[in-house]
Amino acid sequence: MIYLIHQEGKIFDKVFREEQELPIRSNSLVEAFWELAQNYSGEILVWVEKSHFEKLNRPYFKQHFEHQNIMTSYAIRSRYFSDEIGYIDQLPFINPHLGAKYPTWLMSTDVGGIFGKTAIKFQQLLKDQRGFGYLINSIAKIGQQNSLLCYSDPGLVNLENREELEFQASNSDLFAFVGQHYKKEWLWVLSYCFKKYRKEIPLKKLVSGLLKTNYFQAQLELGEIEIKKTKNVLKEDLDVVIPTLGRPEYVQQVLQDLKEQTLPPAKVILIEQNPDTSSESELDFLQEDWPFIVIHQFIHQTGACNARNMALKEVSSKWVFLADDDIRLPNNLLEQSVIELRRLQVDALNLACLQPGEEVVFRKIKQWGAFGSGTSIVKSRLARQCKFDEVLEFGFGEDLDFGLQLREKGCDIIFHPRLSFTHLKAERGGFRSTGINEWDKEVVEPKPSPTMMYLIKKHYTKEMIRGYKAALFLKFYRKQSIKNPLRYYRLMQKRWKKSEELCDELRVDVIGS
């Protein structure tokens, strides 16, 4: 490993290779970073603040850089961007849980690392950047869309107590970064939030950001991750969870597809629901001979959250496939998924779920900001530590919430475009049609939905909530008929307040006061 030691992310100090100090030509921190990436491309390039050098957990670095497409850091005392990045970004990556290894492109200059051969691929694109904190955040932000797996990882250091974080980026840096790494329209949202919440009119910063070279959707080829030699994949075991309501013919087809898998599941856990208390199971084909254990529960309480929570209690294999009841699977999907979980050294895959005739939009493996409750394979040990929030039953957002719980347990979620199956979107059955609140009959219709309001209040920072609200108001303005801005704003404030009220009622109804 190569150690690039600096002072406060600004001043180059010295370089070590293991215990030996290395002479280099560069005097600036950024130039030293590029020089080392070029000259020691096969090694892990570790940057560290001088005062934190003795805290490094060196064995952990070597153990947890499993492949070349990893970038990681940890904020001991400082982070480059403050929570104000949440004004324009509400993905999980910008609100990292510091107590676990967490997927994020937010890099700290305190301590971090990347393989030299990976870093050097960004040099041509970012050669004009002079600030080290800005540079490593640019690498991570662009890299995350190009199969670079980026993390905040407390294991990098031996730390008894973490200090209160300081933030290095100026407001000008924030506007410049948004102008370079997001669609330019987000600069208007950022400016609005500065005006409303900071009482500042950042006109000069806005113009400067609009003129910046934009790297949004920049494409880089970082290379395929090398496959590690592992034991026979057929020795892996996997359970499948399927909640179902009123779709027996679709369930039968799913079971047939699972029967034909090159890596068949150990168990298929079916939670069949029918609200009619006098009804009987429609899944008579379960009596047939299947090459896996079928656990079937027939209940009269409807709701996918409750059903999946019941099913997770029955899971005992290493992996669990959270599936829907109206899908078609290629016969090698489960085997190839386990192979990729090993190759990427991750604990969850979000598979590409496509409707008939649909094509994949995102074509690169990437850290995923969402989670599919019917499209994912997860390490069972972690899935069983989480629960589908029944406050979100019959609405939307329970899958996002479950994904956020997984990330807080240290579970990264990777989207894999080459592992795909078909979602038939059956017209009959399903869970979304049953409502627990007739929100559309309110005199003032809530916006966003009360379930979405619950989700953002549960997981978003103050800045993320403010940014979400600003973006919602601005985007929806073009889709409705009121063109008087003041009248529109007053109405949207009422709709937001109504959503908050119904969100509180929803919590009381489901979990009690």
Image (cartoon, helix red, strand yellow):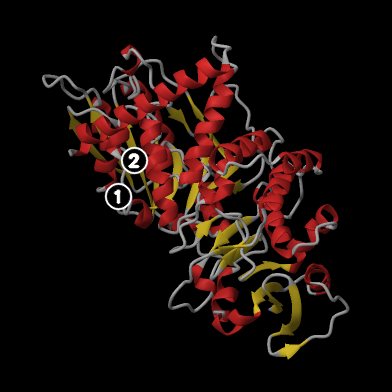
Quadrant that contains the C terminus: top left
- Residue closest to the far bottom: 20
Q: Are marks 1 and 2 in contact (CB under 8 Å)?
A: yes
Residue 200 image point, x, y percent = 63, 42
Residue in the picture at 24% in, 27% down? 302
Q: Image height check: is 68 above or below 2?
A: above
- Amino acid type at image mark 2: Val
From the viewer's perspective, tell me whether residue 137 is left or right of residue 480: right
Residue at mark 1:
315
Residue 27 image point, x, y percent = 84, 76
Residue 404 image point, x, y percent = 43, 47
Q: How many numbered badges does the structure rendering display? A: 2
Residue in the picture at 42% in, 55% down? 408
Cα separation, mark 1 vs mark 2, equals 8 Å
Which picture quadrant has residue 20? bottom right
Residue in the picture at 81% in, 40% down? 211
- Amino acid type at image mark 1: Val
Quadrant that contains the N terminus: bottom right
Closer to us: 32 or 325: 32
Residue at mark 2:
241
Q: Image height check: is 280 above or below 371?
A: above
Q: Image height check: is 260 above or below 414?
A: above
First in sequence: mark 1 or mark 2?
A: 2
Local packing at callout 2 (Cα closer than 10 Å; few below 14, some 14-19, many 20+) is many
Residue 87 — which label?
A: none
Local packing at callout 1 (Cα closer than 10 Å; few below 14, some 14-19, many 20+) is many
Closer to us: 319 or 141: 141
- Residue closest to the far front: 199
Which picture quadrant has residue 438? top left
Residue 244 image point, x, y percent = 31, 28
